[in-house]
Amino acid sequence: MSDNEEPPGADDTADAPTDDAPAEDATNEATDAGAKAQDIRERLRQFAQPFVESLDGRLKEQVDRRVDRRVDETIAARLSVIERAIADLDRSIRELQERLDS
């Protein structure tokens, strides 16, 4: 056999069917399935977006109401403490004025 000659049967592999065709089909199916899944996700997002926005708006309103209520309660509690302190000061001032007047 010379350097230019091929061994017997070397040319037989060129005519043999390749196993790449089933692999390509599986890849194409996976790609198609991925594209379909992405399309379904996008449609679901579009369908659910108004619901999510509505829910988000309602939750914000609810949180705002709760925050407002807590702020009002905190302010009322602090104001009552201040009012008591003012009443105590007023009584003390009256007592001092009565002592000075007598």
Image (cartoon, rainbow, N blue to C red):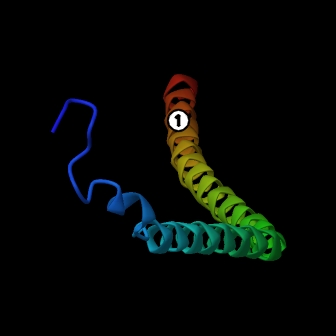
In x, y percent, where is residue 28?
Answer: 58, 68
Q: Residue furthest front?
A: 1
Label 1: how many residues lie within 10 Å, few (<14), some (14-19) or many (20+)?
few
Give whichever of 29, 10 is nearer the camera: 10
Quadrant hosting residue 15: bottom left
Residue 58 falls in image quadrant = bottom right
Q: Secondary structure at mark 1?
A: helix
Q: Residue at x 78, y 65 (%)?
A: 57
Residue 59 left/right relative to 101: right
Q: Report how many numbered discs are placed on residues in the image.
A: 1
**Between 25 and 5, the one nearer to me in the picture:** 5
> Horizontally, is 23 left or right of 8 in the view?
right
In this rendering, is residue 7 above or below 69? above
Toward the top, the furthest residue is 100
Name the residue rendered at 26%, 39% in the picture: 5
Picture layout, residue 95 above or below residue 39: above
- What's the residue at 81%, 71% (across, down)? 54
Identify the residue at image location x=56%, y=53%. 74
- Quadrant location of the N terminus in the rendered image: top left
| Residue holding disc 1 | 89
User: Where is residue 70 drawn, in percent x and y?
Assistant: 59, 59
x, y percent for residue 26: 49, 73
Given the image, on which type of amino acid does mark 1 rest? Leu
